[in-house]
């Protein structure tokens, strides 16, 4: 039982650490992507009425 407790605690700690670092990495990498996507969407929304009026 002692080994199982230690193993579960270690596994939980590793998963927690991985989760935190993955979240940190995702935040660092996804934030610029999110901004780019947001800019592209707003640009598309701005351009669409002009294209409709032209066509």
Image (cartoon, helix red, strand yellow):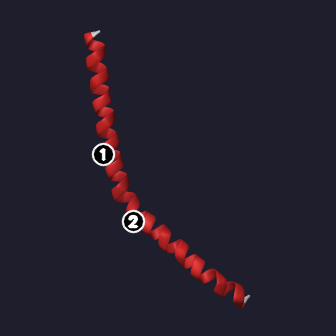
Residue closest to the far right: 55
**Residue 33 in the image: above or below residue 15:** below
| Residue farthest along the top direction in this orientation | 1
Residue under numbered circle 1:
21
Find the distance from the CA under tag 1 to the CA under tag 2: 18 Å
The part of the image, by quadrant, that contains residue 28 is bottom left
Q: Residue at x 54, y 72 (%)?
A: 41
The quarter of the picture where residue 30 lies is: bottom left
Judge from the rendering whether residue 51 lies leftward or rightward of residue 7; answer left or right.
right
Crowding at dot 2, Cα within 10 Å, few <14 / some 14-19 / many 20+, comes out as few
Numbered tag placed on residue 2 in the rendering: none
Side of 30 relative to 10 (left or right): right
Tag 1 secondary structure: helix
Instruction: Report the quarter where the N terminus lies.
Output: top left
Name the quadrant containing residue 18.
top left
- Which residue is denoted by mark 2 in the rendering? 32
Looking at the image, residue 25 sits to the left or right of residue 36; the answer is left
Q: Position of residue 24 (x, y in %)?
A: 32, 51
Q: Secondary structure at mark 2?
A: helix
Q: Residue at x 45, y 70 (%)?
A: 36
x 59%, y 77%: residue: 45
Please provide percent x and percent y for residue 20.
Answer: 31, 44
Question: On screen, 50 above or below 6?
Answer: below
Question: Quick check: 30 above or below 38?
Answer: above
User: 10 Å neighbourhood of mark 1: few (<14), some, or many (≥20)?
Assistant: few
* Total number of numbered discs in the rendering: 2
Which badge, 1 or 2, is on the more N-terminal residue?
1
Residue 5, x across and y down, in percent: 28, 16
9 above or below 14? above
Where is the C terminus found, in terms of image quarters?
bottom right
Q: Residue at x 60, y 82 (%)?
A: 47
């Amino acid at each position: 039982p002692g080994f199982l407790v230690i193993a579960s605690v270690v596994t939980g700690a590793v998963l927690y650490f991985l989760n935190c670092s993955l979240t940190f990495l995702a935040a660092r990498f996804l934030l610029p992507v999110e901004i780019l996507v947001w800019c592209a969407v707003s640009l598309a929304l701005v351009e669409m009425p002009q294209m409709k009026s032209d066509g």
